[in-house]
Amino acid sequence: MSKPTSHLRKATLGGLLVALGIVYGDIGTSPLYTFAAIVRGQPIQELLVVGGASLIIWTLTMQTTIKYVVLTLRADNKGEGGIFSLYALIRRHAKWAVIFAMIGGAGLLADGLITPPISVTSAIEGLGLPQGDTVKIVLFIITSLFVIQQFGTEWIGRFFGPIMCIWFLMMALVGLPHLLKDPSVLRAFNPYYGLKLLYVYPKGFLILGAVFLCTTGAEALYSDLGHCGRANIRFSWIYVKTCLILSYLGQSAWLLSHKGEIISENISPFYAIMPGWFLPFGIVIATAATIIASQALISGSYTLVSEAMRLNLWPKLKINYPTEEKGQLYVPGINLLLFIGCVSAVLLFQRSSAMEAAYGITITVCMLMTSFLFAVYLYAHRVKPIWIGLYLVVYLTIEFSFLFSNLVKFVHGGYFSIFVGGLLFLVMYVWYKSRKIRNRYVEFVRLEDYLPLLQELSNDQSIPKYATHLVYLTSANHPREIEHKIIYSIFNKKPKRADIYWFVHVDVLDDPYTCEYVVDTIIPNEVIRIEFRLGFRVEQRINLMFRKVVEDMVQNREVNITSRYESLSKNNVVGDFRFIVIEKFLSHENDLPIYERLMMRGYFLLKKISLSEERGFGLDPSYVTVEKFPLVIAPVTNLNLKRVYEQEKTT
């Protein structure tokens, strides 16, 4: 059954609080550093401040409000959002779009290596401590955050909503008095000033790289659709956007009171607008908000990778479920990867101002990929081409402008996120492409051709019985086909006599939470095929699922699983089950082109650090036998070998 989607259609007070705590961490902490990045190193001028505020307001409107809150949230996959959910919605119509999903997913993961360092560092810098002490505190907070992931965050998650509600309210209340002192900053609502800044101000176009920091969390907003629901996100965004704009306008008013000055790198406009007596409280609340923002992004990374694994876009990794809360998961491998990346970013850049250069490029790429995928979604839903074209013209213009302005940061730190994002994309691409190469050469045979032989083998008393129930995992989509290697395993490698042969197939569906199965009794009590139809967010616990299917079949009298051994049968003892997992290795008998050879070598290298097949499918190792099977993709055809006879040798 699919997950109900009724929670998408109505907003509740509890749902609004959850949305505040989960969805807006990244975008909600951006006022800490966005305006500082815009004015850094430049004399304060009216055009710079008012134009910068105008660009922020219209970026939040066009990019976050219209693109994501109004449009993209419509593309829900049975209540779930995110770039992989969007891809799953359209892959039947455009399988080639997988490249966009992989690039976007890699960009979103790379962003997860920068968000915690820049957010937490921006908050702690408000203390005005020496740089070395700031780095130590940031490293302590980040390390603690990653250590507690393994124990689950359900116990602190209940505080996220109230804390973020206080955070946004604080931003609004601190910014409002400065706005009232200088209401002239309200001119920023006129897009004219933003456009004038881009075209008139020296190197004004490059300011877009700093402006983009205000909307970096918009992609996460879509990813959290399944946790909060569309209505809750839309209603809570009204409150969040109001508070954000009041904070930015308050900072603008304060900056205008310092015309002609160059704001020191150690002074943050966000903290400067706070009353002196409130500053310690503001820093504490800001630190709590940045920790929540980091936690939300870490959890989102786990979900993103788990989706990629189910869609066969990422090597299978161990997933733990530390609590019984739905959606709460922990991926140790990704936790370690993110931790190393975050610590490296802190040690490499030290200051939040330096981290800004590494921040934004990969998430811009991710937003571009979402635009392409959403356009395909609109096409699949028969939206008029003129509207699809208008959407692409508007958002490709906006996002490519942000991308080009961000690329200037490459030499100043952007190389870090591009390198990480490229590496993550390479992992996905190698895994996906190598599976395509491998599947191209998988040989399937008709199962019905081997049914008489299976029956004869099952009744052949001269061969020792291998197991009462022999279970194979098959990748054959057609119920009447089977891999040749399975037939080879049963008859040739070592004849495996069993009373009942089970063939189990797992079909990963585009619906996120579908969990159903189909039984095909090919020969009653002798050959049975089971197909599990699982959504891409469902944990593949095949051992437990298979046991439940067998119990249901026994209850319905569809199969007799009692042992066939005479002594055990008369006492109604259940027969033994044995799973056979075929583990493939790249045979030396291959003559692949260089490109495919590199792909396959990369695939088997990734296989070494990924979960084994039995653990990936959730099988109990005590019931599993692993067989090695050579993978011959491109057999060597030109073997320069000549036979020499004895008489030829003597002559």
Image (cartoon, helix red, strand yellow):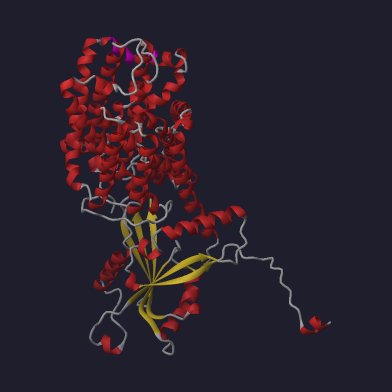
Asked whether residue 190 is drawn in magenta, I would say yes
Q: Position of residue 294 (x, y in %)?
A: 29, 39
Who is closer to the viewer here, 335 or 495? 335
In this rendering, the count of numbered labels is: 0
**Is residue 457 left or right of 249 when viewed as pictured?**
right
Who is closer to the viewer here, 513 or 157? 157
Q: Position of residue 242 (x, y in %)?
A: 24, 23
For the C terminus, the image quarter is: bottom right
Q: Position of residue 525 (x, y in %)?
A: 35, 77
Does residue 12 appear anywhere in the picture? Answer: no
Does residue 467 appear anywhere in the picture? Answer: yes
For the N terminus, the image quarter is: bottom left
> Magenta region, mostly helix, strand or loop?
helix
Asked whether residue 421 is drawn in magenta, I would say no
Who is closer to the viewer here, 318 or 377? 318
Q: Which residue is painted at 51% across and 59% down in the image?
A: 439
**Is residue 456 left or right of 11 when viewed as pictured?**
right
Q: Which residues are magenta?
A: 184-193
Vertical side of 37 occupied by 152: above or below: below
Q: Which residue is painted at 45% across and 67% down in the image?
A: 583
Q: Which residue is painted at 31% across and 78% down in the image?
A: 576
Q: Position of residue 650 (x, y in %)?
A: 81, 83
Quadrant of res 286: top left
